């Protein structure tokens, strides 16, 4: 996956890179990508870079060249770095107060800013006057390099380690661990310091190999970073690779549709026993929790009080669909989408009567979404689409706008080109409990009878 896709860059974006472990490389890689796509890219720094890094830029100029010359250079080179002066071997950017003027006077499509300094370290905590993020930033990318794992928490490897030891009590000199990286990146006074309120935040875990144990550790760190509602996503990859991003972890919510009347069953199927200790709805929630979803909403309707009582110990959100008798699945899905927190990027639609749901299947769907396979992801068994289906937030408004006689599949089918199918080895994605015979068959297939 390219950086532009991972960060969802659009014309008009002002992107600020902060942190440590690959800011300049990320800026340069993204700049080249955007220029290759035909965009006019202006880059600068609100702090400083090395003179050696300046020499790697396609074209560099100072503001004294004038707006006409800068605009001409953007047309010719597509990617231009703007700096103020060189002192010693350091290249200093123009004053941050110049940013609004640059946006108003130059016809660039995207502005990229290195807004932090780390002296070549792989991890950092900012000093009092750092980072220098302009208020105009629309996207901020906190960067951390995974080469820091196992290295000593000292000045040799970490920028300003004293701030970290003072805040968390970590012992200076001890080896840096995965949870430490996550804590630092998501901390409002460290990794997220100074970010404008309206800016999107997508962290970057750089120096991550495509395969192996370190990739798995990076995914774990990403999930821990996402515990901050301020973070919209975490890109995992290596910015010096041809395809620099392996995956983008985002907050995913599950909507469990549990409002049906169970008319063909003759009793509430969700409350039927599944295992010796769990009902169907309790078992489904256990599977979702094991899959580490960021948020779970259960939509209730028929026998709402009993269902709510069952799900309360799981500390999930429960919402009541007042239209469950006439609105069918669509009304419950709408209620679930409206209850999703604002930081959730996509919803996993889960049937409340599909008890053979498995965490490994859920994780296959989540992995396909994270790797950019599609904006809508569904499991497929022998060429038949099943559940749970993951739907990116960009399509939620279309679902909410559907008429009462519409169905979620209307939106899904309207975006066939954005659907990714994950081939699975179990028919559990196709089966639900609709009749007493279904209940018996599903328990048999699950090895419970």
Image (tube, grey):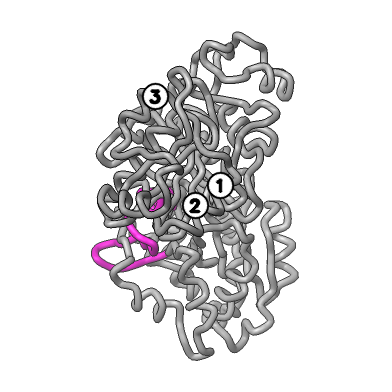
Give coordinates of residue 128: x percent, y percent. Answer: 70, 29
Which label sits on residue 102?
2
Name which residue lies at 50% across and 29% down: 48
Q: Do the residues labelled 2 and 3 touch (CB within 8 Å)?
A: no
Q: Earlier in the sequence, mark 1 or mark 3?
A: 3
Viewer can see residue 4: no
Visible in this render: residue 279?
Answer: yes
Residue 383 in magenta stretch? yes
Few, some or many residues within 10 Å of mark 2 (<14, 14–19, 20+):
some
Q: Which residue is drawn at 73% across and 57% down?
A: 312
Which quarter of the figure has residue 46? Answer: top right
- Residue stretch rendered in magenta on the structure: 360-387
Pointer 1: what residue? 98
Asked if disc 2 and disc 1 are in contact, CB closer than 8 Å, the reply is: yes
Q: Position of residue 171 (x, y in %)?
A: 67, 12
**Residue identified by numbered label 3:** 51
> What distance separates the C-alpha of mark 2 from that of mark 3?
23 Å
């Amino acid at each position: 996956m390219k950086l532009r896709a991972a960060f969802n860059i659009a014309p008009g974006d002002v992107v600020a890179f902060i942190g440590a472990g690959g800011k300049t490389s990320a800026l340069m890689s993204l700049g080249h990508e955007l220029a290759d796509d035909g965009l006019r890219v202006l880059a600068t720094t609100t702090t400083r870079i090395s003179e050696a890094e300046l020499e790697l830029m396609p074209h560099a100029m100072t503001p004294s060249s004038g707006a006409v010359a800068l605009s001409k250079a953007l047309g010719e080179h597509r990617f231009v770095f703007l700096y103020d002066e060189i002192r010693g071997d350091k290249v200093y950017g123009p004053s941050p107060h110049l940013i609004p003027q640059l946006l108003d006077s130059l016809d660039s499509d995207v502005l990229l800013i290195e807004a932090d300094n780390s002296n070549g370290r792989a991890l950092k905590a900012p000093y009092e006057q750092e980072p220098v993020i302009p208020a105009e930033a629309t996207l901020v990318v906190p960067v951390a390099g995974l080469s820091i794992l196992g290295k000593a928490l000292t000045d040799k490897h970490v920028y300003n380690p004293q701030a970290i030891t003072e805040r968390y009590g970590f012992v200076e000199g001890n080896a840096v661990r995965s949870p430490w990286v996550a804590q630092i990146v998501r901390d409002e006074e460290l990794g997220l310091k100074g970010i404008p309120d309206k800016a999107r935040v997508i962290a970057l875990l750089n120096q991550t190999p495509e395969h192996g144990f370190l990739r798995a550790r990076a995914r774990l760190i990403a999930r821990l970073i996402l515990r901050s509602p301020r973070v919209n996503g975490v890109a995992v990859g290596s910015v010096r690779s041809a395809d620099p991003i392996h995956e983008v972890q985002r907050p995913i919510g599950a909507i469990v549709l549990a409002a049906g009347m169970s008319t063909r069953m003759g009793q509430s199927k969700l409350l039927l026993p599944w295992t010796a200790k769990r009902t169907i709805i309790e078992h489904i929630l256990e599977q979702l929790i094991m899959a580490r979803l960021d948020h779970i909403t259960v939509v209730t309707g028929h026998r709402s009080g009993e269902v709510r009582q069952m799900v309360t110990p799981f500390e999930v959100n429960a919402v009541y669909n007042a239209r469950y008798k006439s609105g069918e699945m669509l009304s419950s899905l709408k209620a679930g989408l409206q209850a999703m927190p604002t930081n959730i990027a996509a919803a996993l639609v889960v049937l409340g009567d599909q008890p053979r749901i498995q965490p490994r299947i859920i994780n296959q769907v989540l992995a396909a979404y994270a790797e950019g396979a599609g904006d809508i992801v569904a499991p497929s068994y022998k060429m038949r689409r099943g559940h749970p289906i993951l739907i990116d937030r960009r399509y939620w408004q279309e679902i909410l706008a559907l008429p009462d006689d519409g169905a979620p599949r209307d939106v899904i089918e309207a975006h066939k080109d954005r659907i990714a199918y994950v081939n699975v080895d179990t028919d559990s994605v196709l089966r639900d409990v609709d009749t007493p015979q279904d209940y018996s068959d599903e328990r048999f297939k699950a090895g419970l009878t």
